[in-house]
Amino acid sequence: MSRELRIDGLAHAYALRSVLDDISLRLTAGRTLALVGPSGCGKTTLLHLCAGLLTVQKGSLASDFLRPAVMFQQPRLLPWKTTRDNIALGLKATGMRPAEREARAETMGRAVGLDKLALDLFPHALSGGMQSRAALARALALSPDLLLMDEPFSALDIGLKGQLHRLLLDHQTEHGLAVLMITHDLMEAVRLADTILVMAADPGRLVHRVELTTPARQRGESDIYRTTAELLQEPAVCASFGLDLPRTGIATGCHHRRSGCAVLPLRACSSADGAGTCAATPAPRKKGFSC
Amino acid sequence: MTLLRAWLAGIPAYLWSGWGAIASLFLFFAAWEAAATVYGVLILPPPGTVFSTLAGLIDSGTAWPELAVTARRALTGLALAIAAGSVLGMLAGVSMTASMMSRPLVTVLLGTPPIAWLVLAMLWFGASDGTPVFTVFIACFPVIFVGALQGTRTLDGHLREMASVFRLPARMKLTDLYLPHVVSYLFPAWITALGTSWKVVVMAELLSSADGVGAALAVSRSHLDTASTLAWICAVVGTLLAVEYLLLEPIKRELESWRQQDAGGLT
């Protein structure tokens, strides 16, 4: 049986302020799940819960994954260690020998486009993009089976973003890792994810779900643009981001998709697959959704 | 080993950078000389006389043993204060409650003048080595404790989260996360404490001991020998400066090299 992250009825509150309410999702090995939502909708809280940085207050969270890794919004590199040692940090924690972990860090660093010179520098001498790449390398060096990412590429220019997207997809194909990523960039979500969950704020909850069946590596640019545009026409998505509902919707038929489970042109939710993936979602509540 | 090599290699350039300091020292000697000519030899002997007295003390073999005794007492007290202060300060820094509770206690310790501790120490330890050692310890401890506490508390919470996500074992958290950060707070505290220890030990010896630089000062005072008093003062200050600038400062530079690489980055 493949490994799985299961979240059921998860709720979280900071003091009296409820930030997450009734979150349920499944993430299996080899799949990418993108959580999209406006700032402050509890995405990061959800990720911190998954990473074990917060204790679960209500609901359940179970993970079979053995080697989870996290890539934070900020690079969070140790300023007193060289980039190479930073990349090797997780490996050092596993007790790997210095020579071996340094070689591994170097390979990983090279894979994300950091040359020998950059690896010998301290993080503050690197540009923001290089720091992000080092943080990605640090996470991937562990060869994780679950990768949690919190708006990992938001500080990068589009060229670099593209490079790292490809790197991530290659790594995923090769190692079959599951990715839970948080982003507020819809297009990034459409580019990388197999499932997109849209969140709304106050309290943070899931309001919309999109399944994309075309494998991420086979999606064409025009498909991605079109799908993103169509996603933006969805009433639930517009409401979540506080956008005005478009007056002239593209003919996506979003009217008959009030159920909330969109079938978008990337041919999502083929009935068999749709049943398989969506059946695991618990019975919908009124404000929730179902397919 | 690399630390030692870097230290040795850094000394020439470091000394060369000291010309400005030397120039200002010579200005000070000139002012001293001028004041000496105004007030006369009995009140303020000129630097030349003082240094020849010092040279005489060194030649006759009286200087080194006294300095060694004083150094032993100061360093014992300082070592105890460094060990206790660093460890306890870091432990207190890890816990919010402990740091809140220790703050007022440390303020009390810092606020109590060393001379008050000295009187207590004389009552408790008599004329033994315990008196100067204890006084040095109690004068240095709060300085180091606060340094360690501040250092631990100011560690970026983001990095702590990162460390727990990457499952750093406790020992690695200490050596790779806390210590490198805390050292930049601890080291200045250690240097301050070193200065304090050296000053306090002389004071303690002056009042409580029969040997050491402080006792020698007491003797020269009773002989109204201003020249040898100043000679002893020069010996004490000179040793402190030598230790601080030749040993500690280069080590500090090496430890903080990651901080000083701002120029020449790729950004």
Image (cartoon, grey):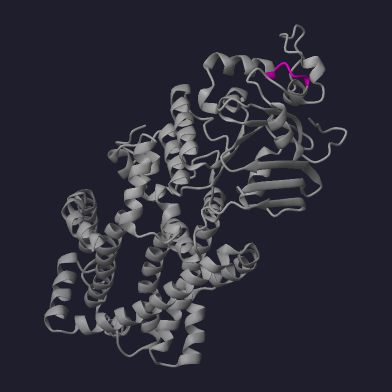
When the figure is inspected, residue B219 is found, relative to residue A168, above or below; the finding is below
Which corner quadrant of the image does residue B69 belong to? bottom left
**Residue B180 point in image, percent of width and height:** 42, 57
Q: What residue occupies the far right of the structure in this picture?
A: A286
Residue segment shown in magenta: A231-235
Query: Any magenta on residue A234?
Result: yes
Asked if residue A96 shows in the view, the reply is yes
Which corner quadrant of the image does residue A205 belong to? top right
Q: Give the residue at x 51% y 26%.
A: A217
Give the dominant element type of the magenta stretch: helix, strand or loop: loop
**Residue B1 point in image, percent of width and height:** 23, 64
Q: Give the residue at x 76% y 46%.
A: A8
When the figure is inspected, residue B148 is found, relative to residue A211, above or below; the finding is below
Q: Is residue B125 toward the left or the right of residue A230 in the image?
A: left
**Residue B258 point in image, percent of width and height:** 35, 48
Q: What residue occupies the far left of the structure in this picture?
A: B59
